[in-house]
Image (spheres, rainbow, N blue to C red):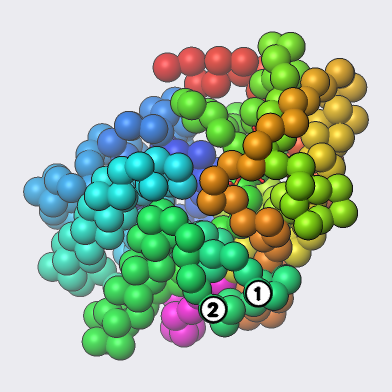
Amino acid sequence: MSTVLITGGAGYIGSHVVKELPRQGYQPIVYDNLQTGHRKSVRNALFIEGDLADSEKLRKTFRSYSIDAIMHFAADCLVGESVENPLKYFKNNVKNSIQLLETMDEFDIKKFIFSSSAAVYGEPKEIPIPEDHLCSPTNPYGETKLIFEKVLQAYLEAGKLNYVSLRYFNAAGADPAGELGEDHAPETHLIPVGIKAVLTGDSIPIFGTDYDTPDGTCIRDYIHVTDLARAHILALKRLEGGGNSGIYNLGNGNGYSVRQVIETIRKVTNRKVTTIESPRRPGDPERLVASSEKIKKELGWTPKYAALETIVETAWQWHRNHPNGYGE
Ligand code: UDP
């Protein structure tokens, strides 16, 4: 059985991948500093509390367990914060990630799955966005993801490793079995913000109503977190089978406006949703919709929970049953 180290495995996306790995015959080991992750979200894996910057602890981990592959989720991922505090982002997402590669090299670990982002594209010139679209990030967060992709490509060309980089669009929803879900503090993402507003009676801000879209609000491509999780395992299988390294978009290929998402929340929860039309949020591109044809064709990925209603339904189930998230 292959052993996979998951950095950031106690986070939202990482924890869903960790749940999926044993089902497909892998042994997961989570390495997470619990700064934003939740200990309770790791149920079926060995857990090591550690920081990416702590190479000694990483070394100790690599010495103690025979690790076959790394899935690297640990990162800072708030666009607004990256604008205010860029060095934090370059340090954690680039410097500490390079340090992880160095430590992997010492232990001759050669398979790497990277959490990248649609933020590498910036303002798209073409919709749906293919992987060979121009990358021109509009914020430091996207810049750090793009730089690290370049590091990986150079490292591949130097014969040091094989990698798959997955460029996520809008991860949303929760484990359909109800065990895992989204618990960020503060929460900034549209679907959980909307659902929490329904539960508390607060209103939801709509950031920008004057975009050049049919209803004036931003369009995004929402992908279910479990579908995202399954893609990581397909990526790993490809590397294990000797397949080529590569970069793949991960989205549903359907765009929904902020108003359409809020309408879906209203339908699914069957409750009143109050909205406040608010100014645009700085740095928000007007439309982000993925072409996911490449991952479908090359890795055989297909989304199982593609419908926006299903995505919102699973998120609603999680938040209703866990109004305080993991309660930590
Ligand atoms: N959004 C909104 N109100 C909120 C949170 C988000 O109108 O309270 C909008 C946001 O401006 C963007 C879309 O919803 O157009 C998706 O935002 P989210 O933060 O969920 O993901 P992002 O696309 O920024 O990664």
| Residue placed most toward the observer, 161 or 184 | 184
Q: CA distance from mark 2 to mark 1?
A: 8 Å
The image shows residue 253 at horizontal and vertical percentages of 75, 64
Q: Residue at x 22, y 41 (%)?
A: 51
**Which residue bears the numbered disc 2?**
134
In the depicted structure, whether residue 110 falls above or below residue 206: below
Give the magenta range.
237-248
The image shows residue 256 at horizontal and vertical percentages of 79, 51
- Quarter of the image for residue 206 reads top right
Q: Is residue 310 magenta?
A: no
* Quadrant where the C terminus is found in the figure: top left
The three-letter amino acid code for the residue at tag 1 is: Lys
- Quarter of the image for residue 161 reads bottom left
In the depicted structure, whether residue 114 falls above or below residue 272: below
**Which residue bears the numbered disc 1?**
125
Q: Is residue 260 left or right of residue 93?
A: right
Q: Residue at x 82, y 22 (%)?
A: 273
In the depicted structure, whether residue 247 falls above or below residue 92: below
| Residue placed most toward the observer, 277 or 25 | 277
Asked if the residues shown at circle 2 and circle 1 are in contact, with their CB atoms under 8 angstroms apart, the answer is yes
The image shows residue 150 at horizontal and vertical percentages of 35, 75
| Residue placed most toward the observer, 33 or 117 | 117
Specify whether residue 144 is in view.
Answer: yes
The image shows residue 312 at horizontal and vertical percentages of 76, 36
Q: Residue at x 22, y 63 (%)?
A: 98
* Quadrant where the N terminus is found in the figure: bottom left
